[in-house]
Image (spheres, coloured by chain):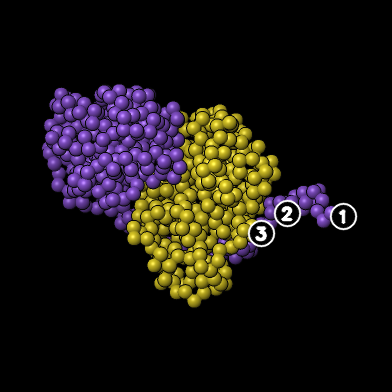
């Protein structure tokens, strides 16, 4: 893929990395397409979290919902490429009226994970999801986001009253026999410490989750988070010499792609960068990708993988 | 007079700011950290990326999924073969396996690696493997120990799982002689065998990576078909997850996770599992998962004597996993007690 200037430069009018030539940027190969993401709810969300790296909100139409008919051709292409697992995110996936039908179609061919804010997990939804899980040979996982172990730490990030509503959603899942993975960002310094983890695990046990599972994620200094805590600085860029001796295999972009209503992107993080788009179909996106965005630096330095 | 801003004012400001956030994007798109007119973003996206023709797309997928030869010689042919996964230093189970497999008429016994870890006195399994003629491949444990790596390379993120994995690895590294480690380093990473008409590839994790987990609930049929086709074989045998399963694919190929004989299969039984392969009718492969009883009480006593963690002993005595839980997919996790 020819790149005349870095992705981030394009958005910054020749800002931070000016003067650096594209050939200094390391490239990664797609080793295998194991993980296929769908931005199934676009950037539309019923919350507007202050750390959202793609600034999802009720009015953010940067990417739109994908209908079942939009998803099916990609699922078919994914079979030929031997995709191992499917992830659905947004925005809030359960705002998408086709979400359950999309899950039903997906679970016929592989395991699925939905990343949700937990607000739309009422009893009816949870029993339907449990029925979908029981009817498939493959695992169904629900990943619910929570950013603090009490309302005082969660709600300033995710919105007033969300702590109680998220926990209600988690309880409903547990009551239906679904064991969620709770995703916690490092928005509060203590979240990912041993003590922080213990508090989250205790909280989940107290709310009916017998086998609590956590997924910790660092923050990307993009979108709303850039506004909250500052954007990337010019030194936060990968260069060719940064390649570890064992290669870039720890980066998720060596084994994943992301589909939105507008085509195929390299990974879930760069969907709001037109330069992160690789093509219209999965077959268009099997080539190399230059690691020239500051978010690539975050993935490398923090060892981030969006998948569970 | 206080300088403090009245609380109701703070609340009002916060509410106004939240409301502004909810409506901030009308007609706008987020591009990185900036808001731009939606049309500008869409135009940039329309021109981005590749747009291949249908024929080019077919060719791209074909190239991407093309088979790769490995030049590994094929052993056999056999009529009946026993295959076991991780031994985890469980010499009692390995002895029981050697007896059981011979009694069932196995012409050869294969082991898919992970000889140490979890159990006591890892070197006890070495003479059993060598004298028993067990044809062994490298697991991630052997690869790590032989190369002097400081962890087992299972990739745990959970601190509790990591804690126990580290104890297990350190103990095994300290109780394995340089000669044993050197022998581990010489084991092949894969083997091929012929059972009847079927050529099978033996690997530890997957044909792609020594530490890839192939669980039943996260290994789709199309993914497995591709692995089989890329490796030009009629079936794949693997271990690494600790849980046994078998899937016959629409193409007729078989993918078999042999499970492990080192610890129970998180099913509440103290037995461990190995796989018995034979020639079925019409040239198909016959696959049987065999439960294996052994002196688990003796193993538990040895583990306690060696000061190994009590949760490991509990697993041996109850059949329920107490550690390494993080790696389990939703379905497999739900089947266990912890």
For residue A257, above or below residue A177: below
Q: Residue at x 80, y 53 (%)?
A: B4
- Of the numbered discs 1 and 3, the one sitting upstream in the chain is 1
Q: Nearer the viewer, residue A199 or B9?
A: A199
Q: For numbered disc 1, what is the local secondary structure?
A: loop
The residue indicated by pointer 3 is B27
Q: Are dots 1 and 3 in contact, CB under 8 Å? A: no
Please state if A221 lies on the left or on the right of B50 as rendered: right
For residue B110, above or below residue A91: above
How busy is the neighbourhood of tag 3: few (under 14 within 10 Å), some, or many (20 plus)?
Answer: some
Say which quarter of the image contains residue A228. Answer: bottom right
How busy is the neighbourhood of tag 2: few (under 14 within 10 Å), some, or many (20 plus)?
Answer: few
Say which quarter of the image contains residue B324. Answer: top left
Q: Residue at x 35, y 34 (%)?
A: B308
| Chain A, chosen colour in render | yellow
Q: For numbered disc 2, what is the local secondary structure?
A: helix
**In the image, which is nearer the foreground, mark 2 or mark 3?**
2
Q: Is residue B22 visible?
A: yes
- Of the numbered discs 1 and 2, the one sitting upstream in the chain is 1
Q: How far apart are labels 1 and 2 at the CA level?
A: 28 Å
The residue indicated by pointer 2 is B17
């Amino acid at each position: 893929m020819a790149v005349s200037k870095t992705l981030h430069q394009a958005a910054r009018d020749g800002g931070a990395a000016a003067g650096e030539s594209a050939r200094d940027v390391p490239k990664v190969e797609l080793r295998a397409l194991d993980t296929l993401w769908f931005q199934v709810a676009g950037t539309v969300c019923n919350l507007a979290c202050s750390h959202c790296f793609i600034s999802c909100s009720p009015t953010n139409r940067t990417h739109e919902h994908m209908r079942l008919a939009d998803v099916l051709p990609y699922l078919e292409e994914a079979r030929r490429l031997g995709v191992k697992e499917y992830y659905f995110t947004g925005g809030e996936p359960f705002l998408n009226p086709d979400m359950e039908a999309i899950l039903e179609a997906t679970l016929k061919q592989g395991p699925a994970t939905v990343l949700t804010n937990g607000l739309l997990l009422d009893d009816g939804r949870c029993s339907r999801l449990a029925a979908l899980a029981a009817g498939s040979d493959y695992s169904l996982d629900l990943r619910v986001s929570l950013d603090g172990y009490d309302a005082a730490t969660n709600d300033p990030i995710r919105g007033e009253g969300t702590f109680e509503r998220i926990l209600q959603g988690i309880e409903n899942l547990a009551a239906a026999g679904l064991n969620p993975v709770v995703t916690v960002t490092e928005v509060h310094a203590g979240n990912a410490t041993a003590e922080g983890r213990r508090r989250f695990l205790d909280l989940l046990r107290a709310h009916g989750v017998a086998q609590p599972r956590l997924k910790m994620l660092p923050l990307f200094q993009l979108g709303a988070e850039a506004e909250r805590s500052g954007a990337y600085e010019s030194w936060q860029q990968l260069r060719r010499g940064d390649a570890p001796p064992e290669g870039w295999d720890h980066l998720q972009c060596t084994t994943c792609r992301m589909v939105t209503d507008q085509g195929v992107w390299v990974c879930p993080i760069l969907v709001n960068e037109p330069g992160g788009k690789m093509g219209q179909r999965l077959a268009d996106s099997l080539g190399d990708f230059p690691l020239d965005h500051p978010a690539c630096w975050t993935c490398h330095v923090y060892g981030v993988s969006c998948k569970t | 007079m206080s300088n403090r801003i009245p609380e109701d004012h703070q609340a009002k400001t916060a509410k106004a700011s939240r409301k502004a956030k909810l409506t901030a994007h009308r007609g706008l798109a987020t591009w990185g950290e900036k808001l731009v007119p939606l049309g500008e973003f869409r135009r940039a996206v329309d021109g981005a990326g590749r747009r291949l023709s249908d024929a080019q797309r077919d060719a791209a997928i074909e190239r991407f999924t093309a088979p790769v030869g490995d030049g590994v010689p094929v052993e056999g042919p056999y009529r009946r073969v026993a295959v076991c996964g991780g031994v985890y230093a469980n010499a009692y189970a390995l002895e029981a396996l050697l007896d059981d497999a011979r009694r069932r008429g196995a012409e050869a016994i294969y082991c898919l690696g992970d000889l140490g870890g979890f159990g006591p006195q890892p070197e006890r399994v070495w003479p059993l493997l060598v004298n028993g003629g067990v044809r062994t491949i490298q697991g991630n444990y052997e690869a790590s120990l032989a190369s002097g790596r400081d962890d087992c390379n299972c990739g745990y993120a959970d601190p509790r799982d990591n804690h126990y994995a580290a104890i297990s690895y350190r103990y095994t590294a300290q109780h394995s002689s340089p000669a044993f480690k050197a022998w581990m380093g010489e084991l092949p990473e894969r083997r091929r065998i012929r059972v009847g008409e079927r050529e099978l590839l033996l690997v530890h994790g997957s044909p792609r990576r020594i530490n890839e987990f192939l669980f039943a609930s996260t290994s789709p049929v199309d993914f497995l078909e591709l692995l089989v086709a890329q490796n030009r074989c009629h079936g794949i045998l693997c271990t690494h997850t600790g849980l046994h399963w078998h899937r016959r694919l629409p193409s007729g190929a078989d993918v078999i996770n042999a499970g492990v004989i080192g610890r129970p299969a998180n099913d509440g039984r103290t037995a461990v599992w190995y796989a018995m392969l034979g020639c079925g009718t019409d040239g198909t492969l016959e696959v049987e998962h065999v439960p294996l009883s052994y002196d688990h009480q003796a193993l538990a006593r040895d583990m306690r004597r060696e000061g190994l963690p009590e949760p490991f002993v509990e697993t041996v005595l109850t059949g329920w996993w107490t550690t390494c839980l993080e790696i389990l997919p939703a379905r497999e996790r739900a089947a266990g007690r912890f």
